[in-house]
C-alpha cells in the first residue's frame, strides 16, 4: 500500500473535521482545524476575555463607595469573578496557539475589540444593580448557548462562567428590588440607570444578522449556536416581565406585545451610535484603555519577576 499523498491526508483531515461538526462532537486543541475556524475562535474568545477584564472597571469604581459591608462583599466577589472569567478565556485562547501578552497588547493598541457595553460610566450605585440585572442578564442569554460551542475548551470554560453569571444577575436584581422598596430618590436613581443602560444592553448582542459578517460561518461551524437577533429577542422577552415586577419603565415607546408571534416587539436600535462606540468614540473608551494600559505597564515587574523565578526553578 502506498503512503498517502499530502493532499489525500489533508482531505482526510478536512473530512474528519466536517464529520465532527456534523455529529455535534467537540473539536479539541490536538485536532486539525481550518485556519478560518482557528482565527474566528481566537477573535471571539479574545474579545470575550478582554470584555471580562475591561468589564471589571465600571463596577470596580464602586468598590470603595459601596453603601454597606454586605454590598461591598458581594460586589468584590462579582468583580473578582470577572477576573477569573478573563483567565479561563485567555487560557482557552492559548490552546489555539495565541499568546496572552500579545492579545493584551492588541487590545491596548486597538487591534482587538471588547464589548461596547463597558464604555459607559457608572454614575450611581443603581448602575451596579442595573449592570447585574441587564448586562449580566444579556451575557447569560448570549453565553448559555456557548456552553455547546463546537470548540471544547471554550465550551467548558463557558459552563463555569455561566454559573457565576447567574449569581451576578441575581445580586443585581436583588439590589434593585431593595432600592425600589426604598425612597422616591432611590426609585428615581434606578429608573435613571435603566434609561441609560437599556439600549446599550440590546447592542451587546451585536449587529442585526443581516449586517453581521461573521454569524453565518460561525453558526455553520457551531461556534455560535444562534444569530444575534434571536438572542436579542430572547433577552427582551425575558426582561420585560422582570421590569414589570421591579416597577420600572423600559425607555422604548414602541415596546409592545405581539400576541401572534408571542414576543415583545421593540423600537429601532441606534446602530450609528453602536458604530461610534466600536470606533472608539463612546463615553469611556479612552479611559478604559488608558487604565488597562497602566495596569499592564505598572505591573510588568511582577510578570518579569514571576517569569525569572519560574525559569530558575524549572517552571
Ligand atoms: N461590542 O459579525 P458579528 C460580559 C463586533 S462579557 C463590541 O456579529 P460575532 C460579562 C464583532 O466582534 C460581554 N464589538 O460578530 C460581564 C465583529 O468584529 P470584527 C462580551 C462587537 O463575533 C458582565 C463585528 O462587530 N461577551 O458581559 C459587539 O459573530 C458584567 C461584527 O459582528 C462576549 O464576547 C459588541 N457588542 O458576534 C463582565 C460573548 N458586537 O472582529 C463584566 C462572546 C459585535 O469582525 C461585567 N461573543 N461586535 O471586526 C459573541 O457571542 C460574539 O462575538 C458576538 C458578536 C455576539 C458579541
Image (cartoon, helix red, strand yellow):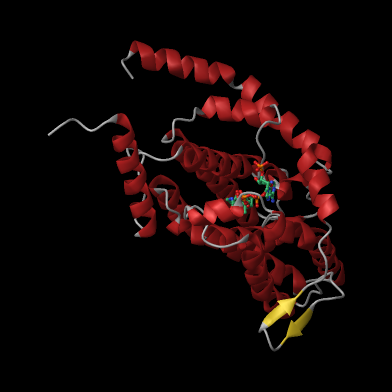
Location of residue 149 in the rendering, given as x and y in whole percent from the top left corner: 45, 54
Q: Taking 75 as reference, is 39 left or right? A: left
Location of residue 140 in the rendering, given as x and y in whole percent from the top left corner: 57, 61
Question: Who is closer to the viewer here, 273 or 180?
Answer: 273
Q: Residue at x 40, y 15 (%)?
A: 309
Question: Who is closer to the viewer here, 177 or 91?
Answer: 91
Instruction: Quadrant for the N terminus, please.
Output: top left
**Above-or-below relation of 238 to 39:** below
Q: Residue at x 34, y 36 (%)?
A: 10
Question: Who is closer to the viewer here, 249 or 20?
Answer: 20
Q: Residue at x 48, y 15 (%)?
A: 305
Q: Single out the residue that lies furthest toward the bottom.
A: 259
Q: Residue at x 72, y 43 (%)?
A: 61
Question: Who is closer to the viewer here, 96 or 218?
Answer: 218
Instruction: Quadrant for the C terminus, please.
Output: top left
**Above-or-below relation of 129 to 44:** below
- The answer to whether any part of residue 257 appears in the image is yes
Dividing the picture into quadrants, the one containing residue 48 is: top right
**Above-or-below relation of 273 to 94:** below
Q: Single out the residue that lies furthest toward the left.
A: 1
Location of residue 152 in the rendering, given as x and y in whole percent from the top left corner: 38, 48
Q: Taking 145 as reference, is 59 left or right? A: right
- The answer to whether any part of residue 123 appears in the image is no
Q: Taking 249 as reference, is 145 left or right? A: left
Location of residue 235 in the rendering, given as x and y in whole percent from the top left corner: 65, 68
Amino acid at each position: 500500500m502506498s503512503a498517502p499523498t499530502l493532499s489525500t491526508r489533508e482531505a482526510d483531515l478536512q473530512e474528519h473535521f466536517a464529520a465532527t461538526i456534523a455529529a455535534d462532537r467537540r473539536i479539541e486543541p490536538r485536532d486539525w482545524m481550518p485556519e478560518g475556524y482557528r482565527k474566528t475562535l481566537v477573535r471571539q474568545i479574545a474579545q470575550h476575555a478582554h470584555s471580562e477584564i475591561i468589564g471589571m472597571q465600571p463596577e470596580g469604581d464602586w468598590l470603595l463607595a459601596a453603601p454597606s459591608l454586605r454590598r461591598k462583599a458581594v460586589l468584590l466577589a462579582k468583580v473578582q469573578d470577572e477576573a477569573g472569567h478573563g483567565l479561563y478565556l485567555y487560557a482557552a485562547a492559548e490552546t489555539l496557539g495565541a499568546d496572552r501578552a500579545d492579545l493584551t497588547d492588541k487590545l491596548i493598541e486597538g487591534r482587538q475589540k471588547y464589548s461596547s457595553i463597558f464604555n459607559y460610566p457608572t454614575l450611581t450605585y443603581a448602575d451596579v444593580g442595573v449592570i447585574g440585572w441587564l448586562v449580566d442578564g444579556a451575557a447569560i442569554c448570549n453565553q448559555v448557548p456557548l456552553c455547546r460551542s463546537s470548540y471544547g475548551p471554550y465550551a467548558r470554560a463557558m459552563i463555569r462562567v455561566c454559573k457565576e453569571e447567574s449569581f451576578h444577575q441575581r445580586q443585581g436584581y436583588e439590589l434593585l428590588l431593595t432600592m425600589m422598596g426604598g425612597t422616591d430618590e432611590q426609585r428615581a436613581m434606578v429608573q435613571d440607570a435603566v434609561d441609560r443602560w437599556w439600549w446599550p444592553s440590546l447592542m451587546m448582542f451585536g449587529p442585526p444578522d443581516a449586517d453581521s459578517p461573521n454569524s453565518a460561518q460561525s453558526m455553520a461551524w457551531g461556534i455560535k449556536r444562534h444569530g444575534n437577533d434571536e438572542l436579542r429577542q430572547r433577552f427582551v422577552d425575558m426582561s420585560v416581565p422582570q421590569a414589570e415586577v421591579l416597577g420600572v419603565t423600559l425607555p422604548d415607546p414602541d415596546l409592545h406585545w405581539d400576541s401572534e408571534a408571542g414576543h415583545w416587539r421593540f423600537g429601532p436600535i441606534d446602530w450609528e451610535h453602536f458604530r461610534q462606540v466600536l470606533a472608539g468614540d463612546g463615553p469611556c473608551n479612552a479611559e478604559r484603555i488608558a487604565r488597562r494600559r497602566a495596569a499592564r505597564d505598572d505591573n510588568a515587574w511582577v510578570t518579569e519577576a514571576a517569569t525569572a523565578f519560574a525559569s530558575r526553578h524549572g517552571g
